Amino acid sequence: MTDQYLYLSPQWAQEVEWRLRLELTPEKMNGLTSSMNNIYNNCPGGDKKFFFVSFQEGVVDQVQTGSGEGPKAEFIIHGDYEIFKQISQATLGAQRALMTGQLKLKGNMVKALKLASLVDRINKVIATIPTIF
Amino acid sequence: MSNTNITQDPYYVDFKARIEQIQSVMAAKNIDLYLGSRLRTMSWTTGAFFPWRAFIVIPGHGLPTAFTFVIDAARAADDSWLDEDHVLGFVPMGGQDQISQISDFIKDQLPAGKGRIGIESGMSNYLPEGNLTHYEYEQFNAALESCELVNAHEIIDGLALIKDEGTINRFREASRIVDAGHQVVYEAIKDGGWKGMTETEIAGLAAYAMRKAGSVWEWSFTGGNEIASGYRTGLAAGACTPATTKTLQAGEPLMVDIHAMFQLGLGDHSHNYLIGPTTDRQRWHANNFLDIVKLTLKTYRAGITPSNLAFEMMGFAEERGFADFMVPGFEHGIGMMGDEWRIGMNDGPFPYWTNPDHVYQANEVLICAMQYACPEENIGFRYENPIVIHEDHCEELSKFRLTVDEIN
């Protein structure tokens, strides 16, 4: 039986990092150097959590999860836990969530649009992780 | 982002110094941050053309940041002195629509998100002026609830009035380009070349010639190049003639008013023709027009006002018996793209209209503009030429000959 990981736990973050390194080569990530911090509002239990990921020249540099707002990043995305959960389950696209105002992005939009397909790639990998929400 | 060698570039404009001037006036007026939205403000502060809705946020210190529709943000950044981190795009996405994006940005710029914000509000005859709309004002006011929004457009208007050398040189070059357009039109329509031609064709010929000579746009919102023939030259009190598909006819006047843009400097010059056979009465009208243009150009200098110039010129027209055919205005304002409307400051007795008592100062640039119209005889002429006001004379930037050419 495949191990299951608790969503946003340190083990889940480790698995995300391992799978991103395995499946997203620097070429697939267009040599990207950037960082993104998803801030989850209204988490179960009422607190705030974050999921931070950074890349250096297309290689995953850091994946972190935790309580609170997390580290500074080039792009910060705010949203409800339930919305991020649907994205991580691949039942909702990140772009649709942004276009419907369910997520709020802070950062340079011109750069963000260039990275939209890369974010989709990341989310697709995350959706393959057996997760307990 | 362009890197300009100041010592070699005659068109160099010190945009950073402009921003610092704005910030200095802001400080004096107790304004913590300026939110510009007018096309003239975008041009004057960024050096780039912003055809889509755009805003500029100027903090109390440091670089400004421009915002526009995302499809054009990268291009605008490329054309501007600002880098891509200071020209941002907005889209209809969470946190990225213009109200959320700009108000969030402003809050980050102000201590505790509080302060006095200068905005641009008012009215204009120029449709793409870009004053904050009622809706935008309400939305920003709600999003920036800890801030006070105050109308402060006069800061830019005051600073942009006197042109620097680089800006004037841009206008000189735009006028040189316009003259190249006029020459090509003349070559094309002389000696019967006009036969079968339409106004739109002439507009296109001029546009092609000017683009070849370095213009990036026939910038006028009045349909680009304005061409009028026959009765359209003499429309009552008219000074706006987008070209139509009307075909040129023998015995009619023809007015060619063309526009070029060079580094946001604007060329705008009208030249007039009589298509033969020409009558003595038409020549009488033409001579009236030429004489008043010459006198007006001779009169322009620092120290005079729009009203005393108009008084003098209308007196001359009355003496000569053609006052009924003159539209009693002799100029319109001009500046970098988007600054086309009122002359000088808009602090006249009628809000947002030209002040008739504005005293011209050296290095103001305006369009010397006159419209002669006799609708009863289907004849009219237009003069437009950017001029630089000097202490004792004005400098005409278009050098194309001042004549009403008779062509056959």
Image: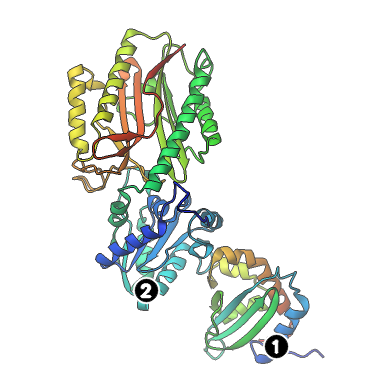
Whether residue B380 can be seen here: yes
Residue plotted at (28% across, 39% down): B389
In this view, the residue in front, B191 or A98, is B191
Q: Is residue B125 above or below residue B245?
A: below
Q: Is residue B408 above or below residue B111?
A: above
Residue plotted at (42% across, 8% down): B277
Q: Say which amino acid is labelled 1.
A: Gln
Locate residue B5 relative to residue A33 in the image: left or right: left
| Dot 1 and dot 2 residues touching (CB under 8 Å) | no
- Res. B153 image quadrant: bottom left
Label 1 is found on which chain of the structure?
A
Locate residue A31 relative to residue B247 in the image: left or right: right
Q: Is residue B272 above or below residue A3?
A: above
Spot occupied by residue B60 in the image (x, y as percentages of width and height): 35, 68
Q: Say which amino acid is labelled 2.
A: Leu
Could you say whether the residue bearing mark 1 is in a helix, strand or loop? helix
Locate residue B214 relative to residue B273 in the image: left or right: right
Label 2 is found on which chain of the structure?
B
Locate residue A78 relative to residue B269 in the image: left or right: right
Dots 1 and 2 on the same chain: no
Q: Is residue B47 above or below residue A16?
A: above
Gap in Å between the C-alphas at discs 1 and 2?
39 Å
Instruction: State which mark lies toward you, 1 or 2.
Output: 2
Could you say whether the residue bearing mark 2 is in a helix, strand or loop? loop
Which residue is the extreme one toward the front?
B7
Q: Circle 2 is placed at which residue position?
A: B110
Q: Circle 1 is placed at which residue position?
A: A14
Spot occupied by residue A2 in the image (x, y as percentages of width and height): 80, 89
Spot occupied by residue A126 in the image (x, y as percentages of width and height): 70, 79
In this view, the residue in front, A81 or B293, is B293
In this view, the residue in front, B359 or A98, is B359
Spot occupied by residue B296 in the image (x, y as percentages of width and height): 26, 29
